[in-house]
Every structure is written in structure tokens, then in C-alpha cells.
Image: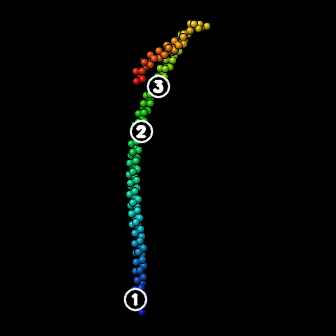
Amino acid sequence: MIYGFGFMIESLVAVLLMLTIAYCVILNNRLKRLKADEQSLKATIAELITATEIAERAVAGLKTTAQECDATLGERLRTADRFCTDLNEQIKAGDALMKRLSRIVVAARPVGGDPDPAAAPDPKAVAAAAQAFAERARSRLSPLAA
């Protein structure tokens, strides 16, 4: 009986050792998978770092482009504003010229009731006079436009 009791204890230890070995095999497999996951995670992190660096360079490029566009657009807006001011001045000068021409035409008409067709100015002569007047005005304004 003493031998039977010892045999049972030895058998129990052997079973526990077998269970321990089986558990160690399972743990070893899990550790292998964990190491494999670790390698894939490292690869993923490396790709993420690369993508982040590319994105940072792209953002820096976009900032530079935006600053250049802002400077160019600002200059264009200032130029457009100057042109607008020049055009407004030229329109005012044109209006003044038209008023003066209309006063000249009104002054050239005969005063009184029935105008004499023979006494009325020649329309071609009035047009030529107006064209000469416009040419003189342009020659005076051309240094201002430049």
C-alpha cells in the first residue's frame, strides 16, 4: 500500500508535469504570434511615420504656396485698384468733355424760331471739329495715363 500511495503521487506529478508542458507549448505559440504581431505593428508604425513626414512636407508646401498666392493676389488687387481709380478719372474727364462738346453744339445752333438750313453748320465740319478737340484732349491726357 505504501507503494501504491507513492505510485499515485508520482502519477499525479507526472500528469501535472504533462499539463505544465502542454500549457508551456500553448504559451510559446501565443508568444510567437505576439512577436509576429509586434513585427507587423513596427512595420505599420514605420509606414505611419513616413506618411506623417510626407504630410508635413505637403502642408509646408501648401503654406508656401498660400503665402505666394496671397502676395501675388495682393499686388494684383492693388494694381486693379489703381486701374479702377484711373478709369474713374478718365470717365469723369470723358463726361466733362461730352458736356463741353454738347455746349459747343448748342452754341453752334442758330437762335430763334425756324433755323435756316443754309445757316446751320455742316455736320461733317462739327464732327471734324469735335474729333480735333478730342485729339487735343487725348494728347494732354496721355502723359497722365502713363
Instruction: Write down the residue under mark 3.
Output: 87
Dot 1: within a 10 Å radius of its alpha carbon, few (fewer than 14), some, or many (20 or more) residues? few
Which comes sooner in the sequence, label 3 or label 2?
A: 2
Using the numbered discs, state the Cα–Cα distance from disc 1 to disc 2 in whole angstroms. Answer: 92 Å
Residue 10 seen by the camera: yes
| Residue in front for this viewpoint, 33 or 131 | 131
Instruction: Write down the residue under mark 1.
Output: 6
Instruction: Write down the residue under mark 2.
Output: 69
Determine whether the residue tagged by mark 2 lies in a helix, strand or loop.
helix
Amino acid type indicated by mark 3: Leu
Query: Residue 7: horizontal and vertical position, in percent?
Result: 41, 88
Amino acid type indicated by mark 1: Gly
Query: Residue 23: horizontal and vertical position, in percent?
Result: 42, 75
Residue 103 seen by the camera: no
Is 123 positioned to the left or the right of 19 in the image? right
Which comes sooner in the sequence, label 1 or label 2?
A: 1
Determine whether the residue tagged by mark 1 lies in a helix, strand or loop.
helix
